[in-house]
Image: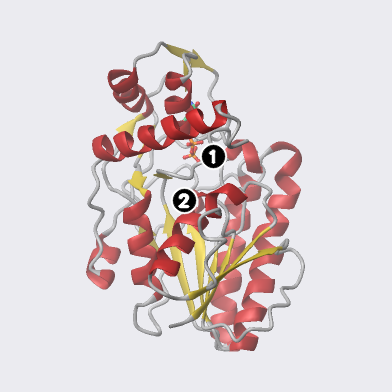
Amino acid sequence: MSKILVTGGTGFLGSNLCKRLITEGHTVFCLDNNYTGRLLNVANLLKNPNFTFIEHDICDPIGITAHLDYVYNLACPASPPAYQGSHSIKTTKVCVLGAINVLELAKKNNARVLQFSTSEVYGEPLVHPQVETYRGNVNPIGIRACYDEGKRCAESLFFDYHRHEGVDIKVIRIFNTYGPNMDPNDGRVVSNFICQALSGQDITIYGDGHQTRSFCYVDDLIEGIVRMMNSPKGFTGPVNLGNPGEFTIKELAEMVVSKIGGKVVYKDLPSDDPTQRRPDITLAKTKLGWTPKVPLNVGLDKTIEYFKTQIKLFNQGKVK
Ligand code: UDP
């Protein structure tokens, strides 16, 4: 069994990953400053003796003394409303200083380290579907740049630490993911649509709804992530992980309405909102034997059940 650090461990993906690693019997250190992460996501894990929560901001050096075998670096606000605006400068720091601190820690421990990068490195893509060799089309001065360029810089740091310091790295690029432990208030499209419909509010489509996204159910993504971490040394990636099924935002709204009901309204499209996004997952299929299994229709039902339970607990005053 291994000693594993998960930065960003109380967030949506981090908490799902911690749960998987604890289930496999590993010792897990979950590090987060809970800016967008939520302790309630790991409430069931806190009782487990193999699980330790550390409140820490990865912009500061990480002083864990346990000898670590693996580090998963996810710490970063990931929803556009959370990383833009007043938090944008901090977001760049989290991406860049966080990567340096994590890489220094991995170097000291001789640990393997996996970076959670993003489809945002492709920006407004001119190649469709996106392959890993595509270098992207990012606006470096736009409102998404703090995240997009921050994550691009983190990739560059990972590869420089690999080339010059011999650090054992892995890089994945994650496309839109959804499922249990999403924050109902973080503003992402799946959580927004479901929570709006469940609470009788209007379902807000930004723009005309013709922009596309590819939605991966969280369990599928976690399987891909773990396979990447366990892939042979020297296979660094970057590797796209996502579900290649592509839907317009309007189609997503229609699916939610057909399941829950509700009324759609149209709002302004935020600037630099990518027009289309779909991963080419040939590399993940070939190298990791990975392919997502959960169709959007099924994953949405599971996610709706999760949010129904959360809303019930909220109404009973059991979650904030
Ligand atoms: N979106 C929307 N209504 C919402 C939230 C998001 O129409 O209430 C759109 C958003 O403009 C984008 C897409 O849904 O085109 C995906 O947004 P999200 O924030 O989930 O992720 P992104 O892929 O943009 O990072």
Q: Which residue is mark 1?
A: 183
Q: Position of residue 90 (x, y in %)?
A: 74, 51
Towards the viewer: 173 or 46? 46
- Say if disc 1 is inside 8 Å of ligand 1: no
- Tell me: residue 215, above or below residue 116: above
Q: Nearer the viewer, residue 281 or 108?
A: 108
Q: Relative to 177, does residue 287 appear above or below in the rendering?
A: below
| SS for dot 1 | loop
Q: Which residue is mark 2?
A: 122
Q: Quadrant of residue 254?
A: top left
Q: Residue at x 29, y 39 (%)?
A: 246
- In the rendered image of this protein, does residue 115 appear above or below residue 204? below
Tell me: is circle 2 under 8 Å from ligand 1. Answer: no
The image quarter in which residue 249 lies: top left
Q: Residue at x 33, y 70 (%)?
A: 227
Disc 2 to disc 1, C-alpha distance: 25 Å
